[in-house]
Image (spheres, rainbow, N blue to C red):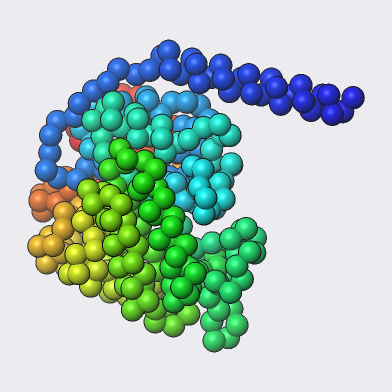
């Protein structure tokens, strides 16, 4: 009897999913083409936002919204406790994506309809969880400090010197490059590095990056390689991430530097103290702005002011994240929100 009830529940669940998919295809938001711009105007779609859109089938509405506001890039989180798409090399995180769905494929399709570039953003980079299948299956891939610690910043970290780890990432990135031919780019961020507590792994991270980028470019030479790090000094001291060397070696096509500050005056000071003028000689440059956490989002006026400051310096921008700037978690009056949206 119990088995029959379980089967019946699973059947109704599957029927519900099919109905949702059919309804979502029948009520698609209209396509749109944003204004052309040489500057990066991006938004990060976090694992929270990605899961929300997957479970509600509202991806088309979100992309239409961004297109109307003349954004041109969406960085879709696809690697956080596993992938959000089926992979031969990494387990799938079904907490962030429903069975029988493919959030990355959907994002690419809707991005094309709305004139947006879609990037697969590998947020967790070198990080993993202690209970993750990857960590349990390959304990020799995990870094350990001289005092025998593994847990740094609430995560375990993969060893970039390990040849099997290197091949894992080569496989992971070339797989997505070959499988999603309309994908515009791949992005890694400040977690594409290892905490300095494990020793200086800068050379190892540079070599790993070179292997991955060269392999990806053999498969998809047109795919944009995007990096979103912290400022260089912080990146080197905290994560063994000498990303300026990567830029000079031609391993990166686009850089979105995270300057997460509370006020627009702090943003201006951070830009003045940065090496963005030098970096812009090598790649397209943008400034990453922080819209606040879901429990304490920044005011819309402050976000707009920070965007204005960045534009005055001639740089593009990207907002972390859609959830707390434009999405369902934005707690703001509709009139205030529309005023903000139309001003960007």
Q: Position of residue 96 (x, y in %)?
A: 54, 41
**x, y (%) of residue 81?**
54, 53
- Looking at the rendering, in which quadrant would you find the N terminus? top right
| Residue 290 drawn above or below residue 146 | above
Looking at the picture, tell me which residue is in the foreground, 261 or 156: 156
Percent position of residue 67, x then y: 25, 29
Instruction: In this rendered view, identify the residue nearer to me: 211 or 96.
Output: 211
Q: Residue 42, how many percent across, how many down?
A: 26, 43
Residue under the image location 26 percent in, 34 percent down? 116
Asked if residue 215 shows in the view, the reply is yes
Question: Where is residue 65, by image quadrant?
Answer: top left
**Visible in this render: residue 339?**
no
Q: Residue at x 24, y 68 (%)?
A: 246
Q: Where 68 falls versus 222 (above or below)?
A: above
Q: Is residue 27 above or below residue 200?
A: above
Side of 140 relative to 121 (left or right) = right
In the picture as drawn, the residue positioned furthest to the top comes out as 26
159 sits to left or right of 280: right
Q: Residue at x 58, y 86 (%)?
A: 147
């Amino acid at each position: 009897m119990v088995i029959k009830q379980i089967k019946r529940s699973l059947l109704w669940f599957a029927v519900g999913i099919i109905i949702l998919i059919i309804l979502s295809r029948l009520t698609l938001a209209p396509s749109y083409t944003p204004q052309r711009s040489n500057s990066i105007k991006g938004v990060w779609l976090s694992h929270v936002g990605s899961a929300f859109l997957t479970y509600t089938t509202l991806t088309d509405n979100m992309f239409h919204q961004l297109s109307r506001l003349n954004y041109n890039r969406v960085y879709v989180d696809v690697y956080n406790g596993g992938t959000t798409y089926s992979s031969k090399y990494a387990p799938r995180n079904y907490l962030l994506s429903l069975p029988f769905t493919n959030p990355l494929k959907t994002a690419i399709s809707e991005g094309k309809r709305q004139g947006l570039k879609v990037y697969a953003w590998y947020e967790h980079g070198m990080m993993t969880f202690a209970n993750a299948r990857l960590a349990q299956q390959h304990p020799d891939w995990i870094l350990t400090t001289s005092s025998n610690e593994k847990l740094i910043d609430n995560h375990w970290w993969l060893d970039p010197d390990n040849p099997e780890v290197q091949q894992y990432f080569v496989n992971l990135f070339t797989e997505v490059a070959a499988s999603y031919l309309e994908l515009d780019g791949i992005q890694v961020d400040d977690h594409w590095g290892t905490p300095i507590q494990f020793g200086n792994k800068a050379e190892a991270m540079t070599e790993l990056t070179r292997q991955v980028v060269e392999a990806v470019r053999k498969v998809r030479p047109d795919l944009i390689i995007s990096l979103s790090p912290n400022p260089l000094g912080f990146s080197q001291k905290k994560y063994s991430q000498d990303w300026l060397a990567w830029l000079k070696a031609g391993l990166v096509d686009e850089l979105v530097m995270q300057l997460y500050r509370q006020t627009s005056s702090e943003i201006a000071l951070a830009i003045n103290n940065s090496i963005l003028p030098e970096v812009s000689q090598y790649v397209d440059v943008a400034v990453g702005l922080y819209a606040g956490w879901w429990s304490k989002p920044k005011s819309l006026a402050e976000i707009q002011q920070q965007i204005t400051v960045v534009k005055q310096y001639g740089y593009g921008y990207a907002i972390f994240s859609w959830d707390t700037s434009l999405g369902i978690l934005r707690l703001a009056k509709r009139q205030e929100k529309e005023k903000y949206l139309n001003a960007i």
